[in-house]
Image (tube, rainbow, N blue to C red):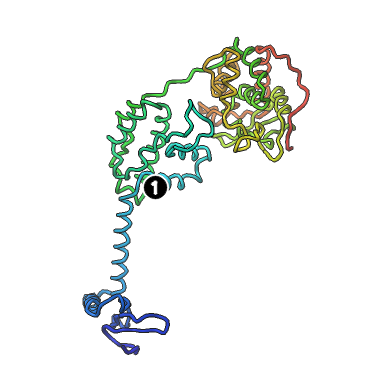
Amino acid sequence: MSERQGAVGLGVRATPRGAPSYIFQREFQGKSPRITIGATADWTISAARERAREMQRDIDQGRDPRLVKAERQAADAATFKAAKVAELTVGEAWKLYLDDRKPIWGSRHHDDHLQLAKAGGDKAKRGTRGRGITIAGPLHSLMGLRLAEVTAPVVEAWAAKEAKTRQSSARLALRCFKAFLNWCAEHPDYKAHMQPSNPAKTRRTREALGKASAKSDVLLKEQLPAWFDAVRALSNPVMSAYLQVLLLTGARRTELLDLQWKDVDSRWKSLAIRDKIEGERKVPLTPYVASLLHAVPRLPNIPFVFASALAKGGRISDPRAGMQAACAAAKIEGLTPHGLRRSFKSLTEWLEIPTGVVAQIMGHKPSATAEKHYTVRPLDLLRLHHERIEAWLLEQAGIDFEPSVGPHTNA
């Protein structure tokens, strides 16, 4: 076919670098666009003629064949995408959800979501109740379903089954799953395949898993001597220090586990605690806590205060074993690490410490307008109350303490 401008109709074009191809060229709006139909090896002459006639009809109707081709390709791509999304499983969407939320979540929250959907079957690092392999997470049985198959009856049946063996973890899994389904319902690609209302929000599901009972484990004033004696007698000095500091600061379990030496300021007598509410809060470094930190061995190349050379993350990963050993020795039943935080709050009632002071030390949200917007307590004012709390707790525990030396610090 001639290459001159104005050449029309169906032709074959060969180039030095490519195989011969059928092309269509016809004047349209003052120009002669050249459109490739396909290689001669792939198209028969009759099929190429029919395709050329289609493009000629487009031109006769005032439409650019190139735009028609692009629209057809876009429609095919949309159809293919819709079909692919329709087959998307919960597990595939769950992974995309976690990737999307990871920059916003903390690492622990992200890891918790991974565990909820984990398949299990791996060799356990530590046997649990005699098991040598890990079990599947509560949400794993839902991961193989298509998104469109996640209906209220399906979630209700899942809840009824999980409630028989692990009601508490299933309640956590349900909360996470509801948030995941909300995310899917707002996603432009997935919302068309979701149920009109969140299938994880039904009365039957809530009833199947029940309500979490309020925890009430707490140290009584008369239990302080036995508890401190047992904790101070632990063979692991790091665990011993950690549990005592946990009670004396009222911190959350993981907040204190994440404490690093750079967070310990002996000059201004403060601890910088990473807070899930405020991001970070400063609390007083009281004298007895300072002495405990000074006695903690500092491991090379590990930034954590409560370090462990054997733990994967470089710090104590789970304080429950040490807590259980101490409580068994002290003959105190049912006390958990979080119960020490509850104990700090409860025991301050004996001293009539202002509620706002205790809340600020513990990292609780302010509960009143005046607390939120008008009351600003500097560190030295907190220290006045906090040192009084510490001295009283030590007195009740029968510990005779005289401040001497401060902790290790990077300052």
Q: Amino acid at mark 1?
A: Glu
The spot of residue 407 in percent (x, y) is 73, 29
Q: Quadrant of the N terminus?
A: bottom left
Q: Is residue 301 left or right of residue 172?
A: right
52 or 231: which is nearer to us?
231
265 or 174: which is nearer to us?
174
From this view, report whether residue 137 is shown above or below residue 80. Answer: above
The spot of residue 274 in percent (x, y) is 59, 35
From this view, report whether residue 122 is shown above or below residue 333. Answer: below
Image quadrant assignment for residue 347? top right
389 or 407: which is nearer to us?
407
From this view, report whether residue 122 is shown above or below residue 288. Answer: below
Number of marks: 1
> Who's the residue at 63% across and 12% down the image?
226
295 or 130: which is nearer to us?
130
Q: Determine which residue is flagged by label 1.
A: 92
Q: Is residue 201 left or right of residue 395?
A: left
Image quadrant assignment for residue 147? top left
Image quadrant assignment for residue 29? bottom left
Q: Is residue 252 left or right of residue 150?
A: right
> Who's the residue at 29% across and 36% down the image?
154
From this view, report whether residue 389 is shown above or below residue 105. Answer: above
Q: Secondary structure at mark 1?
A: helix
> Who's the residue at 30% across and 70% down the image?
69
